[in-house]
Image (cartoon, helix red, strand yellow):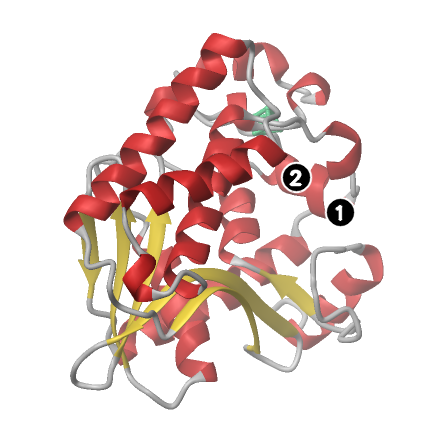
Amino acid sequence: MGLPLQSIVVKCKQEYKNDEDPLGDILSMFRASPFSLNMFQQCPRQYKFQYIDGLKDIYRKPRPYFTMGNHVHATLKDFLSVVPVDERNLSKLENLLREKWRRYRKGFNDREDEKRWGGKALNQLRRFAQNQDISGTPFLVEDYHSVELTDTILLKGRIDRVDKEADGSLHIIDYKTGKVPEEINQTQLHIYALILSKKQNLPVRKASYLFLEAGEFRTLEPTAADLERAASYVIDLVNRICMEREYPATPNNYCGTCDFLEICPRKEEAVKLTINEDELDF
Ligand code: SF4
């Protein structure tokens, strides 16, 4: 029988530095997010480099898909929360993107590359303006949420948008600027639903990915059992992270997006597995 979770997490916290949490005063808790948990699942060594060794600021590189994705997210956030309804139209949306793009344009190989990514962003926003209801005001837009999942685990996540449906229930929408994958990550949506259900009294009936390039929704209707499973998943994974001692490098299709490729102990294999940027499903 291993240590009880409480002891494991406290022990873990003595060894770990985690600088991402806006609630910096809750120092005694292990901080987990869908992003960090997914990283550990994908490659424990990448997780170690980022969250334990704190090497993110030394090795982080600007990437075209992140620059593009961040600008599209920020544009949609402002469009739906700041721009008055009667001023919302395609040209306003495009102008917002251009303003943001001018302020930060890192990660591109050259001018042509930047143009290509800019074109992708514009196409996604055009599709959004054509196919989505742009007259509504979301219940919440792009907000960081933190909830105490247990006495020792602070669960946090950034939720792009939450709509209030006609029946008063909530609908989580996570924008994706990459391609539609064969299978969606249901766990991530369930974790978002878990977080939101702990912060709001209204029921969370739907959780969706909106793939902006394809203009397609993938929607789940999370049940109470899904949320319980999501909570167990987080607790088990935090337990595993705290018990882990080796943090093996596990080369995968996303190695090309890993900031630590140059110091990866399995760099040669990792380089070979890297997939085309257009195939990424962020
Ligand atoms: S390059 Fe790949 S295998 Fe190496 S640390 Fe990064 S994600 Fe892991």
In primary-sequence order, the first of circles 1 and 2 is 1
**167 versus 10 height, above or below:** below
Residue placed farthest to the right in the image?
Answer: 14
Callout 2 crowding tier (Cα within 10 Å): few <14, some 14–19, many ≥20: some
Residue position marked by numbered label 2 in the rendering: 247
Using the rendered image of the protein, determine whether residue 230 is visible from the camera's viewpoint: no
Separation (CA) of disc 1 from disc 2:
11 Å
Counting other residues with Cα less than 10 Å from the Cα at mark 1, is it few (<14), some (14-19), or many (20 or more)? some
Please indicate whether residue 245 sits to the left or right of residue 189 in the image.
Answer: right
Q: Position of residue 8 (x, y in %)?
A: 70, 67
- Provide the residue designation for mark 1: 52
Q: Element at badge 2?
A: loop
Helix, strand or loop at disc 1? Answer: helix
Quarter location, residue 198: bottom left
Which of the two residues, 281 or 215, is positioned nearer the viewer here?
215
Q: Are marks 1 and 2 in contact (CB under 8 Å)?
A: yes
Instruction: Tell me if residue 277 comes above or below residue 193 in the rendering.
Output: above
The quadrant where ligand 1 appears is: top right
41 w.r.t. 105: above or below: below
Task: Where is residue 271? Give x, y as percent.
Answer: 54, 12
**Viewer-proximal residue among 2 and 69:** 69
Residue at (52% x, 50% y) in the render: 35
The x, y position of residue 131, in whole percent, is 15, 48
Q: Is residue 122 visible?
A: yes
Q: Where residue 43 sits: x, y (%)?
A: 55, 36
What residue is drawn where x is 32% and y is 70%? 137
